[in-house]
Image (cartoon, rainbow, N blue to C red):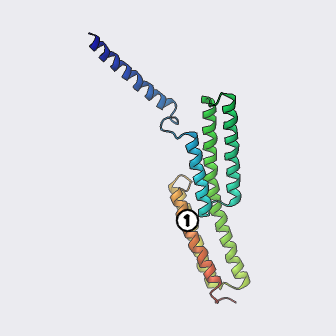
């Protein structure tokens, strides 16, 4: 009888634990399988570093993002100091929300950087026309490449609910690199003035 009772108790306990896990997943989906705060911070640091190295983030944008990260780390230290070295559930939730906002800022800054780069390349073409280092035919070809990149950005955003994925941004940056090299080559090929 004792063995049967233990078997019954084990089944009941297993059912209770399963129900609790399901309830936690339903009530707090961000907790289940979520990264720790430190893991998220490290991932965001990698995203910022990647954005700088790929040219998707300007140094000024990276500094702004880093300041947000430092402010959040300072808040975490203060919250832990108030609570004996740990974060309360409310503190963790607030930190996760701030990490979400920083993540959104990183994505937005990377997208803004693409537009800034397109604008700079447009300016370079204009300067080439003004200075005579680009012929009208070269300028038209370069403009067509710029238009193609802009169309690709719109198509990628339409596919992804208005956002560019990391892969999309990398492809666009590669295309912008190609256009930039073409601008430089055209300006120095001697066909203009």
* Image coordinates for residue 106, horizontal then vertical, percent: 62, 52
Q: Residues within 10 Å of mark 1 (few under 14, many from 20)?
A: many
* Image coordinates for residue 34, horizontal then vertical, percent: 51, 39
- Residue 144, image quadrant: bottom right
Secondary structure, mark 1, is helix
Picture layout, residue 10 above or below residue 96: above
- Residue 164, image quadrant: bottom right
* Image coordinates for residue 132, horizontal then vertical, percent: 71, 85
Q: Residue furthest right?
A: 130
Pick the front one: 49 or 165: 49
Pick the front one: 80 or 151: 80
Which residue is depicted at the point 60% across and 57% down?
Answer: 49
Quadrant position of the C terminus in the picture: bottom right
Residue assigned mark 1: 172
Question: What is the count of numbered marks?
Answer: 1
Quadrant position of the N terminus in the picture: top left
Picture layout, residue 121 above or below residue 68: below
Pick the front one: 106 or 87: 87
Which residue is depicted at the point 58% across and 69% down?
Answer: 176
* Image coordinates for residue 114, horizontal then vertical, percent: 62, 63
20 relative position to 94: left or right: left
Picture layout, residue 149 above or below residue 64: below
Which residue is depicted at the point 48% across and 35% down?
Answer: 32
Which residue is depicted at the point 51% across and 29% down?
Answer: 27
Pick the front one: 104 or 143: 104
């Amino acid at each position: 009888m004792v063995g049967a009772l233990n078997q019954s108790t084990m089944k009941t306990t297993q059912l209770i634990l399963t129900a609790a896990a399901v309830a936690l997943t339903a009530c707090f989906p961000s907790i289940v399988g979520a990264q720790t705060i430190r893991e998220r911070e490290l991932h965001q640091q990698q995203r910022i570093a990647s954005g700088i190295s790929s040219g998707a983030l300007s140094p000024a944008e990276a500094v702004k993002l880093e300041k947000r990260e430092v402010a959040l780390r300072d808040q975490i230290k203060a919250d832990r100091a108030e609570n004996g070295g740990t974060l309360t559930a409310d503190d963790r939730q607030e930190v996760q929300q701030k990490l979400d906002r920083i993540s959104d800022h990183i994505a937005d800054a990377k997208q803004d950087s693409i537009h800034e780069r397109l604008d700079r390349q447009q300016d370079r073409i204009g300067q080439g026309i003004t200075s005579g280092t680009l012929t009208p035919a070269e300028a038209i070809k370069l403009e067509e490449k710029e238009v193609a990149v802009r169309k690709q950005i719109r198509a990628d955003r339409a596919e992804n609910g208005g956002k560019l994925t990391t892969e999309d941004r990398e492809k666009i940056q590669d295309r912008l690199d190609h256009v930039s090299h073409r601008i430089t080559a055209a300006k120095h090929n001697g066909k203009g003035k």
